[in-house]
Every structure is written in structure tokens, then in C-alpha cells.
Amino acid sequence: MDHVIVIVMENHSYTQVKGLPYITTLIHNYTSFSQSYAVAHPSQPNYLALWAASTLGNTDDGCPPSGSPYSAANLGHSCEAAGLTWKSYCENLPSIGSTTCSSSDNQYKRKHHPCPDFSNLTHSKEYPYTRLATDIAAGTLPNLSFVVPNMCHDMHDCSTTTGDTWLASNMPAMISAVGPRGLVILTWDEDDKSSSNHILTVFAGPGVKANYVCSSTFNHYTLVRTICDVLGLGSFANASAKVTPTDIWNAAVTAVEPSLLEGLSLSQPSPNPFRTAMTATLVLPSERLVDALVVDCSGRRVRNLFAEQRAGTSQITWDGSRDNGQRVVPGLYFLYVKAGREQMVRKLVVMQ
């Protein structure tokens, strides 16, 4: 994907927000997660988890957080290392790159903005929220945007209705701005401490299924892993052990088990995960035109393997390289094989 925007709201459970008017339209039009969970209490360790796939041992809202500035891997550092762009956009942030713990009006709180807590990224990319509209208008939206509403609009100090109204006024422009190859992620830092930290997460954009509820268990670390995979970044920290959900994407390919296709089968790739190369065995009952390619988890083509007539038993191999010969970043990919009118997909995991 070309653009990902993450919006983080505050301190409400799944059941408290899923029925709000605008959020209801998001759930109807896009993909939501019924089993999404925060990883800690209070706020600050969750924001660190959303940025660095780790709470980094933090257990409170102290400012600056204990042990900072951190040099641990994080989304900003990973984007810069990969040549991608990123920015944070925070309502009521006093100035670009401000390290203040709280704005004079107490509407901005650094505990909700993890980027200043790291030493290995460029702090001039941390902007007041008003800059987002400017970047959208100029066509300069970065690859990754981290949006932090103020203490009222994020539902922390004001009602859920106020927050829902803010989303209704702001999210449509974001969804439009990310374009056909983009994704807007709406999530909450934690619940209201009355349940099991069960929160709502919604993926919005043309690349996800409409009115689809994913029941896979999903948390802040899974979210970071998904961002890494869709942007082509290597995963890190607790995100490395997570798997990006595969059932949410609005793609033309569908996984089909070999047993459902009489006389035709595609084995599971071996080895998998792999570092240097994998092989899968294709069995065809008759000669057919076979197209084989590798795509990433957003459905974007990574490597065309072949398009040719095949029959009987043959091998499909991939060495982890792109069409241009460069090696892919470690992460989740899919082998897509079309044989006549039949389609099969197998998950691939490339290791470092």
C-alpha cells in the first residue's frame, strides 16, 4: 500500500463505541475486528506498543516516560531506514517537534504521542494536526501518518458523541486522501478498565471488505505487524510473532483447499518460513495455462514467476526476490496460482 493513516482514540470499550452513528457507518462500509484488544493500562504503554510493538517496560503515564529516549525499533525509524516517509499529526501540539508534556490548554498530552520518546527518528516530522489538511491538499501525504486527536476529540475528556462527530468530520477526507492503494486504521488505546481491554478497531479503505467483521484475535502488536507488512517494512519486537490477518482484504484471489479441486492440487510451500528459497508442488490432471505469482498481503504483485502451459506434476519455486531482482523485506506474502479457471493461494513467510 502507498499510504496508511492510524487514528488513536481513548479509553472506551468495544461495546461503548460500536453503535455510535458514524462509527456504525464505518463498520457497515469497511472491515472491523470483534476481538481486538489493548495490551496494557494506562494510556502511555499502549501508545508505545502501537509505535514500537513493545511497552518498553513502561507502566505509567509519567512524562517523559521512564527510560526514554528509547533507541528501540519503531515505525518512524523503520520508515526512514526503508526510504519511506512518515509524520505524526497531533491536535493542539504547540509547535513542530515540541517535547512539552502538556499544552497550555491541556488539550495535548505527550503521553498520547509516542514519537518524541525515541532518539532514532527525525522529530521535525512531528506536526500540529492542522498540517494534515495542508499535506492532503498538496498531495504530500506521507506513507505513514499517526493521528492524535486532542483530549476532547479522542473521547478522553468529552463524550463519545463528541468523538464520533469529530471522526465524521475528519475521517472521510483521510479515506479519500489515501487513495485506492491506502488504508485508514481507527483504534482505541485501551478500554474504560471495566472489561478485558476489549476495544474497537476498524480498517477503512478500498482494499478491505465491506461490512466484514473479522473474528481473529487482534491487538496493538498485530496492528504494528499489519502496518509493517502492507508498507513493506521488516517487523520488529512483539510484532514479529504476530500474523497479519488474511481474510479482510478485498482481493480477487481466494484460498482454495486442494481437496476441493478434483485431481488438481498445490502443496504447502517447503520450507516455510524460509530464508533462501521455497518450493511448492503443483499437480494438474490435464494440460492447462498456469499463471504463478507472488503478492504481498495487500494484493500487490511482488514477483511474476511464470505464465505457461503445464501438465502433470511440476515444481514452483521462489527465491524471495522481486521482479527487479531485489530481495523482499522479511514478512508475509502469498503464492497465487491460477490453473485454468481454478485459483489457489498459499501463505509464505520470508525470514531475515
Image: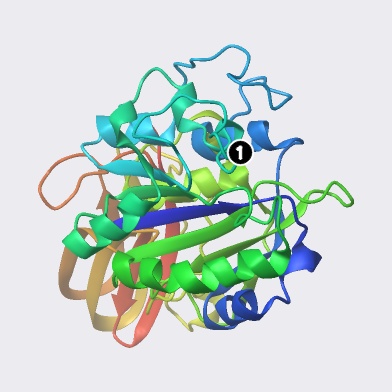
Residue that protrudes farthest toward the right in the picture? 194
Residue that protrudes farthest toward the left in the picture? 324
Viewer-proximal residue among 79 and 163: 163
Q: Is residue 199 visible?
A: yes
Count of residue discs: 1
State the image coordinates of residue 84 (x, y, percent, origin top left). 24, 41
In the picture, the quarter occupied by the N terminus is bottom left
Secondary-structure class at tag 1: loop
Q: Quadrant of residue 94?
A: top left
Viewer-proximal residue among 234 and 82: 82
At label 1, the amino acid type is Asn
**Lateral position of residue 257 relative to residue 271, left or right:** right
Viewer-proximal residue among 282 and 302: 302
In the picture, the quarter occupied by the C terminus is top left
State the image coordinates of residue 276 (x, y, percent, origin top left). 30, 35
State the image coordinates of residue 7 (x, y, percent, origin top left). 51, 54
Relative to 232, residue 68 above or below:
above
Mark 1: few/some/many CA within 10 Å (<14, 14-19, 20+)? few
**Lateral position of residue 148 relative to residue 339, left or right:** right
State the image coordinates of residue 242 (x, y, percent, origin top left). 57, 43
Q: Residue at x 55, y 60 (%)?
A: 186
**Lateral position of residue 200 relative to residue 308, left or right:** right
Q: How is the image coloured?
A: rainbow
Q: Is residue 299 visible?
A: no
Q: Quadrant of residue 49?
A: top right
Mark 1 highlights which residue?
A: 106
Q: Residue at x 75, y 35 (%)?
A: 42
**Lateral position of residue 175 relative to residue 38, left or right:** left
Q: Residue at x 24, y 82 (%)?
A: 288
Q: Residue at x 38, y 55 (%)?
A: 4
